[in-house]
Amino acid sequence: MAQDTAPAAPATSAPVAAPGAPCGGDFEAWKQGVAAEAKAAGVGQAGLDALEAATVDDKVLARDRAQGVFSQTFIQFSGRMISAYRLKQGKARLEKYADIFARADQQYGVPGPIVTAFWALETDFGAVQGDFHTLNALVTLAHDCRRPQVFRPQLVPLLTLIDRGTVPADVKGAWAGEIGQTQMLPIDYLADGVDGDGDGKVDLRNDVADVIMTTAKKLEMKGWKRDQPWIEEVRVPEVMDWSQTGRTTKLPLSQWSQWGVTRPDGSPLQDNGLKAGIVLPMGYKGPAFLAYDNFDVYLEWNQSFTYALTAAVLASRFAGAPAYDPRNPDPGLNQDQMKQLQTKLEARGYDVGTVDGILGTNTREAVRKEQQRLGLPVDGWPTAELLDRL
């Protein structure tokens, strides 16, 4: 909290929310509104008792206020997350559960390496599922008026899961309410959980078959296209119309070949009949990848471009690809410089979201437009030169 932030008013002075109010007001009165909603949805006494005992968790609010989405560069973040341990453990699990992965691929069209990458990054294959009391976390975030529309819809599904005995009342997970080995929100757990081994229940915390099948189903529902690639590392030429690059500018591989894009070893691209964009996470001098339609599904899972690309690269490693070539990107900006850049972009009328020193999607797009205006390579990678020119 900033030093000049006024202290919160005493709880007794807070307005009392009527039952059913979306957020804020007296906490106990607000919970009565949630209880009425839960009863109407068929939640029984076990779920209602759990809600009655739920309390506000200030640590959750602190995490929500302080969260930052991957201020590290792609090379830093992926280098840390794609560890030798995860590569070894992922390969072992792909072999151990090969029959389940094959069933998930057959049923949902999602290959094992894709599921395994999320499994690795989210919880280290179930080892680190989170230690926040899930119900307390969700009532805290739903009662808080910063983003109630995100969290309030998760409450009745969680209470239903508790009421049915699918999860215990004191189930623990991530601070934002995700549960299980690939971190599912309660609404997805309830609606789309798959009983992968036919034991009559869906246990996403302990049952590997349920985890694999449910994760594959979720990815299919987010738009995964069967038998299609997701990313492919490439080498870009020294000179090119960089304004044509970017995830959303999808062109035939024949066009990229015409412009000098090759495979990492310099051999020609193999035209597969699909379209792809060129993503340059650290500019045109850094690593480069073709991004197909299936890469967009990674961003449906997590909106951080750095996380999404790291997950896609990790999946490619599990599928047999070698480590990518980091090449030699221009030095980026530190967090303070990035904040200066965002402030300057805002002054020019760009919506960069929050001035947080993080290179998010809005900031990247604003950078590309300014690079084009200034005659710089349009690759979305902010440098000290761009900052000086602005």
Image (cartoon, rainbow, N blue to C red):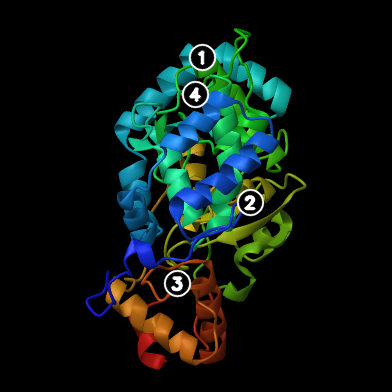
What residue sits right under mark 2 in the picture? 296
What residue sits right under mark 3 in the picture? 381
Instruction: Assess disc 4: are there few (<14), some (14-19) or many (≥20) residues with their C-alpha within 10 Å of its C-alpha.
Output: some
Q: Residue furthest right?
A: 273
Q: Amino acid at mark 4?
A: Val
Q: Amino acid at mark 2?
A: Asp
Q: Position of residue 334 (x, y in %)?
A: 29, 72
The residues tagged by marks 4 and 1 sit, at their Cα atoms, a distance apart of 24 Å
Q: Nearer the viewer, residue 360 or 46?
A: 46
What residue sits right under mark 1 in the picture? 97
386 left or right of 219? left
Disc 1 to disc 3: CB gap under 8 Å: no
Q: Secondary structure at mark 4?
A: loop
Q: Position of residue 336 (x, y in %)?
A: 28, 77
Disc 2 to disc 1: CB gap under 8 Å: no
Q: Secondary structure at mark 3?
A: loop
21 left or right of 336? right
Mark 3 vs mark 2: give the one in front: 2
Precedes in sequence: disc 2 or disc 1 = 1
Q: Amino acid at mark 1?
A: Tyr
Say which residue appears at 40% left-offset and 26% top-offset.
126
Mark 3 vs mark 4: give the one in front: 4
The residues tagged by marks 3 and 2 sit, at their Cα atoms, a distance apart of 20 Å
